[in-house]
Image (cartoon, rainbow, N blue to C red):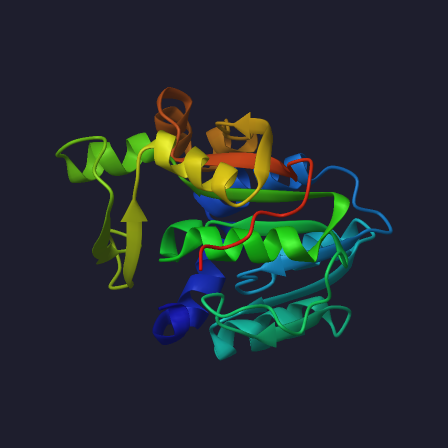
Amino acid sequence: MYERFAHEYAAHAEDSAYNALYDRPAVLGLAGDVAGRAVFDAACGPGLYARALLDRGARVTGCDVSPTLVDLARARCGGRADLRVHDLSEPLTWVRDGSADLVVFALALHYIDDRVALLREFRRILAPSGALVLSTEHPTTAWARLGGSYFTEEPVEESLSPERDWPIRAWRRPLTAICAEFREAGFLIEELLEPRPVPEMADRYPEDHAKLEDHPAFIAFRLIPAPGPPPRPPR
């Protein structure tokens, strides 16, 4: 979806209120100390998280479905990360079992149709002591914007930004459904975070800061593999 506006989005995300001063600090905070760790950056976009993880000492691999975003990410990371074009609706056949200490999956879960299958792939590539850190739109945000029942589960086509022609297709779901998919894929929630904007946002983007102090836009999780063997997909 991002291919047609990849360059515009990359420039926007680098310094925007919601990306630079809200989601990235939250996700990187949940990631914790990554020095010497093998991190898989799923849906890496223009490489903003990958670059931050590399600067913190991680060994980074990752992917995105957009060839333009992968090119931008490779350039941003200066050849230090193994980043590939890959559609996350397909298995990560090129990633070994148990090879990642951490999977980072920022603001992309809501684009995936078969989320349980993808989450199972993440569990497969994670080491037993590993973790998955992900963020997604807060379910109450979609409800406030779209109306109807909070418990509606459906894909919605709209623009990523109300000020731009950036068409996307994303799922709206209640928190119960989100957490049930984690459990079905074999994960436990170690930490749930409704982010708060960093103080710098108050100076640079005061209206966004005031809004996010009253109502979260995103929600983030640190998930760990549940004890026992990974759940088998239905036949």
The foreground one among 99 and 3 is: 99
Query: In this rendering, is residue 88 above or below 12?
Result: below
Q: Quadrant of the C terminus?
A: bottom left
Q: Tag count in the figure?
A: 0
Residue 202, given in percent of the width and then of the height, sits at 47, 28
For residue 38, which quarter of the picture? bottom right
The foreground one among 229 and 204 is: 229
| Left or right, residue 147 beside residue 34 | left
Q: Quadrant of the N terminus?
A: bottom left
| Left or right, residue 197 beside residue 171 | right
| Residue at the far right in the pictured view | 36
Query: In this rendering, is residue 19 above or below 204?
Result: below
| Residue at the far front in the pictured view | 235
| Left or right, residue 220 beside residue 206 | right
| Residue at the far left in the pictured view | 148
| Left or right, residue 104 beside residue 81 | left
The foreground one among 215 and 32 is: 32
Residue 103, given in percent of the width and then of the height, sits at 65, 51
Residue 18, given in percent of the width and then of the height, sits at 44, 42
Query: In this rendering, is residue 71 above or below 230?
Result: below
Q: Is residue 17 visible?
A: no
Query: In this rendering, is residue 189 above or below 60?
Result: above
Q: Is residue 88 visible?
A: yes
Residue 28, given in percent of the width and then of the height, sits at 65, 41
Residue in the picture at 39% in, 57% down: 114
For residue 173, which quarter of the picture? top left
Residue in the picture at 22% in, 30% down: 150
Residue in the picture at 54% in, 46% down: 20
